[in-house]
């Protein structure tokens, strides 16, 4: 074993010494990088022995190795990755699009450093030159392994065999040549020859490269390798005109588009030492956006066509509309112009593009062809394929799988286009008949582009075009039966219509259909709309369906209510003759019409109005509420014409603790009226405050006024009707007819006097017949500085306002003076408000409301 180790050591030593001595130039300059690489592969003991035998300082040799490694590293050029620059393209219609130039992003993900790759497979056509390292392995009679450099003279020196000239040979030729020569010299061996490492070479990347300059790359590098080494191409560099120059002559022009678009790398030639890769400045450009697969800015040659540019952009999307492609072009006068190009036409597709062209490929229509649309109370609304001969029964084979539970089975519509102007007609059908009886007239045959609307009988989710109390004016006008101009700014009507829309989605689905039918109306072409009112579930305006009858309109309105009078309904119809327009009324037996009596079920015409009357003397269950000190308080159903006294008797009258003088009677209609009046008063007062504040020398108490306005907007009206309850019970000629929602509050006996307003402490006091109004005010701390002592008044327990004469303030109470349950009000002096005319009214409303609430809450 020791002999084998020594022979291996002697072999390496001999190899190192021989290769060093045979190259005097290399010896003079010291060991080459390849020799040092061989030396580094030896064990440490062999390195020490070899260095001593050659008289070489081992530490100096290691330092030389590090220095050479550093020199190699210095040839590596750092490359900074970058993002391609976005360019803003503004079209002639003002639309702004951000596009990036095609191809430059290939270099956006370049490595931070470019190091020559030495592990690539060497092609057979590779030409061997100085600097390459050749691996020679000999097997058989002798086993030898050499890594030999190609010297500057172009020779490979094989130990014991001598030098062999290999420069200029291809890799394949070198393998064959060296193998034959070695087998001639050493009999009975096999030889494997390969390239151990490639030589490095210096090339120049110049012009509009991202980082122009000299670069060290390996001998198998091509044009693209050099470009990557330089970080790619700058934003003003050309991707289509990259030139390779050798010894001052143009060797090859490289179009990077061939590689990026077609995958053709045939012109990406291998470089040689000293080659110059020159990147010319960018040439003509066009931009492409819209319905293409790869929108961007493209560089063009002199004779490229629209077809070529569309191919560069990856082709058209299926959604493109090529027949009306818009091209924005600069004219000879440097003015922008627009040209329409039909990209579906071969001749126009073959026309040449010009520098600066902006090509906008437009999108096709969103409309569907050979399809139908289903909306409303269905499980899967949307667009579906149309098939010739398809009927309603084919669309909805059964109820459960296709319809929602709330679907109206009696009223559905088909909206159909009847001409190229997209005018429509409406067909009405009974969905239940269409499904259960396919032979019925309701099972209508569907045509392409039909829209089927299935309505609901219950409330559905709404998506209205509204914000606050604002909704579409046309929709409002349609539902209100007025023109948009007539409707104006009727906020009350708008609010009611919004509530109506929230109750049922039927009008939301109908709105676009009705709008379209209105637009179709013209002279000689009456609007195909009809109206129903009265005792139907959904009164309003409806489309006049083809062959529509009274029974059709009743079905559209959701059917009649239980209060409908079936013996007679009225159809009001417009008539027009040569001289004037008029109206006629047609009586209809609604019972017979709904029973499919052909004579009674008359056909309807444009703008007919059906009024379904109510059964005479029909009343719904109207309820009033008695609260407080009644023997049997609670809710009572009233008959038409019944009075408050009648209901009090039903409740058993008052208890012994009742205080009828303080009864509070409220009514829903009065509450709504008070809400309206409060809003108007607040608006008027706000305007008056603003007007006073602009007056020169105004001393208006702004904070006080704003506080009052805030209180007015927050107050909740009671809707009180002032009545004398004791008189109502005892006087047959004094009574109140009741309405639905009326409420009577009767508090328990009160023995107190309330003091509110501009007093120091607003409070209540026990009633004392010997105490005057002034005494009660003094008991409340007296009046404030802002009090108006001349206008003090009293709110009686029943809501009456009592103005007490000044002479009576200091007298004892009489029947005309204070009574238990009364409230003394000390108002604010108007001088502190610059004599605002509405101030007294506003404060009086606030005080009266407060007293009414106090009476109600005290029950």
Image: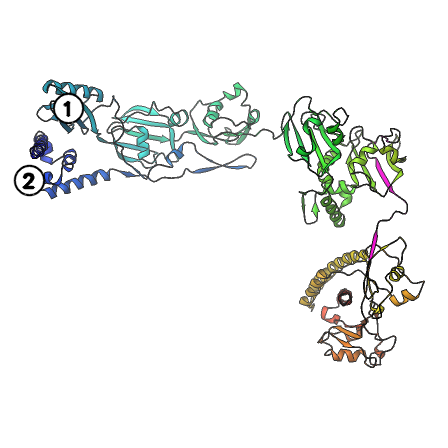
Image position, residue 444 (x, y; %): 74, 26
Secondary element at image label 2: helix
As drawn, 852 above or below 66: below
Membership of 620 in magenta stretch:
yes
Q: Is residue 694 visible?
A: no
Whether the residues at callouts 1 and 2 have beta carbons within 8 Å, the answer is: no
Image position, residue 744 (x, y; %): 82, 62
Kindly identify which residue carries mark 1: 139
Label 1 crowd (10 A; few <14 / some 14-19 / many >=20): few
| Residue 236 in which image quadrant | top left
Horizontal side of 625 relative to 105 (left or right) equals right
Give the numbered dot on residue 72.
none
Label 1 to label 2: alpha-carbon separation? 31 Å
Q: Say whether disc 1 or disc 2 marks the residue closer to the N-terminus.
A: 2
Task: Say which residue appears at 89% left-offset and 56% top-offset.
Answer: 642
Closest to the observer: 836 or 399? 399
Secondary element at image label 1: strand
Task: State which quarter of the image contains the N terminus.
Answer: top left
| Residue 777 in which image quadrant | bottom right
Q: Is residue 383 visible?
A: yes
Membership of 856 in magenta stretch:
no
Task: State which quarter of the image contains the C terminus.
Answer: bottom right
Per the rendered image, the range of residues in magenta is 599-624
Closest to the observer: 76 or 530? 530
Give the numbered dot on residue 52.
2
As drawn, 581 above or below 347: below
Closest to the observer: 323 or 243? 323
Horizontal side of 215 relative to 529 (left or right) equals left
Image position, residue 471 (x, y; %): 70, 45
Horizontal side of 169 relative to 713 (left or right) equals left
Dominant secondary-structure state across the stretch colored magenta: loop
Label 2 crowd (10 A; few <14 / some 14-19 / many >=20): few
């Amino acid at each position: 074993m020791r002999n084998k180790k020594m022979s291996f050591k002697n072999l390496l030593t001999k190899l190192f010494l021989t290769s060093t001595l045979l190259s005097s130039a290399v010896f003079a300059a010291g060991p080459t990088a390849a020799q040092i690489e061989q030396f580094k592969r030896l064990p440490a003991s062999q390195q020490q022995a070899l260095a001593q035998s050659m008289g070489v300082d081992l530490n100096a040799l290691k330092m030389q190795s590090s220095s050479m490694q550093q020199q190699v590293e210095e040839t590596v050029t750092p490359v900074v990755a970058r993002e391609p620059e976005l360019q803003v393209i503004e079209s002639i219609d003002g639309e702004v699009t951000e596009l990036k130039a095609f191809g430059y992003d290939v270099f956006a993900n370049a490595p931070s450093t470019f190091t020559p790759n030495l592990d690539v497979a060497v092609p057979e056509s590779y030409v061997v030159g100085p600097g390459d390292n050749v691996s020679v392995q000999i097997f058989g009679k002798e086993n030898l392994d050499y890594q030999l450099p190609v010297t500057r003279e172009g020779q490979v020196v094989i130990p014991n065999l001598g030098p062999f000239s290999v420069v200029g040979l291809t890799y394949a030729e070198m393998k064959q040549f060296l193998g034959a020569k070695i087998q001639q010299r050493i009999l009975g061996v096999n030889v494997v020859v390969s390239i151990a490492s490639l030589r490095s070479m210096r090339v120049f990347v110049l012009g509009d490269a991202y980082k122009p300059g000299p670069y060290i790359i390996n001998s198998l590098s091509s044009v693209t390798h050099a470009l990557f080494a330089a970080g790619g191409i700058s934003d003003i560099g050309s991707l289509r005109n990259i030139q390779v120059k050798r010894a001052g002559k143009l060797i090859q022009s490289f179009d990077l588009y061939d590689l990026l678009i077609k995958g053709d790398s045939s012109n990406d030639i291998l470089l040689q030492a000293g080659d110059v890769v020159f990147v010319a400045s960018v040439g003509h450009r066009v931009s492409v956006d819209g319905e293409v697969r790869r929108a961007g800015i493209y560089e063009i040659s002199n004779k490229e066509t629209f077809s070529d540019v569309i191919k560069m952009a990856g082709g058209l999307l299926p959604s493109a509309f090529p027949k009306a492609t818009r091209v924005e072009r600069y004219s000879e006068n440097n003015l922008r112009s627009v040209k329409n190009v039909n990209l579906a036409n071969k001749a126009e597709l073959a026309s040449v593009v010009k520098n600066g062209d902006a090509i906008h490929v437009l999108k096709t229509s969103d409309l569907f062809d050979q399809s139908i649309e289903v909306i409303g109370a269905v499980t899967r609304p949307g667009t579906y394929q149309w098939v010739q001969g398809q009927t309603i029964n084919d669309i909805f084979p059964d109820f459960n799988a296709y319809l929602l539970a709330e679907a109206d089975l009696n009223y559905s519509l088909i909206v159909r286009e009847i001409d190229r102007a997209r005018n429509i007609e409406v067909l009405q059908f009974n969905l239940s008949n269409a499904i259960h009886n396919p032979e019925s007239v309701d099972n209508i045959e569907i045509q392409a582009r039909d829209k089927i609307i299935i309505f609901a009988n219950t409330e559905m989710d709404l998506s209205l075009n509204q914000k606050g109390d604002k909704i579409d004016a046309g929709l409002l006008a349609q539902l209100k039966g007025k023109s948009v101009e007539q409707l104006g700014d009727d906020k009350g009507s708008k609010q009611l219509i919004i509530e109506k829309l929230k109750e049922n989605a039927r009008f939301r689905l109908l709105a676009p259909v009705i709008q379209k039918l209105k637009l179709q109306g013209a002279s000689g072409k009456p609007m195909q709309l009809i109206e129903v009112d009265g005792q139907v579930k959904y009164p309003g305006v409806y489309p006049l369906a083809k062959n529509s009858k009274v029974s059709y309109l009743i079905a559209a309105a959701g059917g009649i209510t239980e209060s409908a009078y079936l013996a007679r309904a009225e159809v009001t119809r417009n008539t027009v003759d040569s001289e004037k327009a008029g109206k006629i009324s047609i009586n209809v037996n609604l019972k017979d019409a709904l029973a499919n009596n052909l004579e009674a079920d008359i056909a309807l015409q444009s703008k007919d109005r059906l009024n379904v009357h109510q059964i005479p003397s029909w009343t719904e269950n109207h309820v009033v509420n008695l609260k407080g000190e009644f023997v049997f308080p609670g809710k009572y159903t009233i008959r038409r014409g019944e009075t408050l006294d009648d209901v009090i008797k039903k409740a058993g009258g008052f208890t012994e603790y009742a205080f009828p003088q303080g009864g509070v009677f409220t009514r829903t209609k009065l509450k709504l009226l008070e809400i309206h009046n409060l809003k108007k008063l607040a608006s008027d007062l706000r305007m008056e405050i603003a007007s006073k504040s602009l007056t020169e020398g105004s001393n208006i108490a702004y904070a006080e006024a704003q506080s009052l306005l805030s209180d007015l907007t927050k107050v909740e009206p009671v809707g009180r009707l002032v009545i004398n309850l004791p008189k109502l019970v005892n006087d047959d000629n004094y009574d109140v007819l009741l309405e639905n929602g009326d409420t009577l509050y009767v508090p328990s006996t009160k023995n107190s006097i309330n003091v509110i307003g501009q007093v120091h402490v607003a409070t209540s006091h026990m009633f004392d017949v010997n105490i005057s109004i002034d005494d009660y005010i003094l008991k409340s701390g007296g009046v404030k500085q802002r009090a108006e002592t001349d206008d003090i008044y009293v709110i009686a327990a029943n809501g009456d306002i009592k103005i007490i004469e000044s002479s009576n303030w200091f007298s004892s109470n009489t029947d005309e003076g204070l009574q238990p349950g009364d409230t003394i009000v000390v108002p604010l002096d108007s001088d502190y408000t610059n004599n605002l005319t509405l101030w007294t009214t506003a404060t009086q409303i606030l005080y009266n409301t407060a007293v009414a609430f106090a009476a109600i809450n005290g029950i």
